[in-house]
Image (cartoon, grey):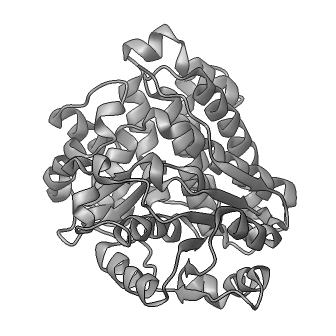
Amino acid sequence: MSLINYITHIQFEFGSIRLLKDECERIGIRRPLIVTDKGIKAAGIVDTALKALGSEAPVTVYDGTPPNPNEAAVREAVTAYLHGNCDGIVAVGGGSAIDLAKGVAVCATHDGPLRSFAVIEGGAARITAKTAPVIAVPTTAGTGSEVGRGAILILDDGRKVGIISPFVVPRTAICDPELTMGLPAGMTAATGMDAIAHCLETFMSPAFNPPADGIALDGLWRAWQHIERATRHPDDRVARMNMMSASMQGALAFQKGLGCVHSLSHSLGGLNPRLHHGTLNAIFLPAVIDFNKESVSMREENKLDRIAAAMGLGQGSDVGPALNSMTKRLGLPTGLAELDVTREMFPDIIKGALKDHSHKTNPRIASEDDYRAMLEASM
């Protein structure tokens, strides 16, 4: 059985942050907790959100989101939510802030520690309609978490896990490309490659969902056409709009599931939270695509050539090299060795990848040896 479900309310427009108050009223949020990070606050974007909410709204702000959100930050933000007597959350920031907000939305309204809601712990069934409503205001164009049904969070024991449920989908996504205009080039590139990875992996996933496939291929086309322009010309409004759309589209589509790129990135990111998720995805993509090309679903549906067509390439065999070349042109690392990843880390990376929720939705189920070969090819 395939689940085909597109229900998220999305406001997409330059300047759409002005609609924040209206969306809070529509959903019934009267005392919001803003979840953000110190960089977003220092950049003045939180002030923009507060202005949009209006002076009469009692607002609590939590700005302690770390680059890779973790269980400790969830506990801190839950405390802020409860002390502020909040009734909903406005996430302002990149995927880290939005994922943290989702963790808070669950833990502030359910009994039990964060780990009890992780997919690998059977936690999806424990998440109910009591989950606090979330409005997501993304400030990067990468994760697409503003329309996604999951959050990736690091537990106290170091595991990087997925909290996945239809109840954590933000009630509204306010996608305002204006908020991404000040994003530095390196972050634009890394988050943009994250969006590309989402479009690619969800399209390769063998689950039957033609609408998702169409959304993913269009998102891939937009990201591939505009990522360099957005990186090199940060004030290019057309490029910023298309990158934000590609990010959103990748996440709308990845309800199909992801694959080995993400199982490896989640595992390695849990071992070293300083590594950027989008950069890791960019590095792993060529090796995983090479591994996937012999899968039944990839061959029967001619998926690699369809990917190549969306990217404006001649044939499917050009995809991996083109991704590597793009990563290099964007100034991102193209190998794990550049990130000080060593072969001694392989056993722990593989152990985590085999347990990750994305492992089972890859078009080919990877073995321990398969993961080792992908890691070697990505060095």
Instruction: Point out residue 185 in the picture as x, y percentages from the top left corner.
Output: 67, 68
Viewer-side residue, 283 vs 71: 71
Q: Quadrant of the N terminus?
A: top left
Q: Where residue 3 sits in the image (x, y, percent)? A: 48, 28
Q: Report x, y in % for residue 151.
A: 42, 57
Question: Number of marks in the image?
Answer: 0
Would residue 323 be visible to someone looking at this image? no
Please tell me whether residue 79 is drawn above or below residue 225 in the rendered image.
below
Observer able to see residue 222: yes
What is the quadrant of residue 69 in the picture? bottom left
Residue drawn 51% across the image and 80% down it: 86
Task: Name the residue nearer the viewer: 101 or 285.
Answer: 101
Where in the figure is residue 253, as x and y percent of width and height?
A: 56, 37
Q: Residue at x 57, y 71 (%)?
A: 91
Taking the view exactly as shown, the residue that stands out farthest to the top is 300
Q: Is residue 108 left or right of residue 35?
A: left
Query: From the viewer's perspective, is 8 left or right of 289?
Result: right
Task: Left or right? Give the position of 195 relative to 275.
Answer: right
Where is 277 relative to 317, above or below? Answer: below
Residue shown at 68% from the left, 72% from the top: 183
Q: Is residue 242 above or below residue 100?
A: above
Q: Say which residue appears at 38% left-offset and 53% top-offset.
A: 128
Q: Quadrant of residue 236?
A: bottom right
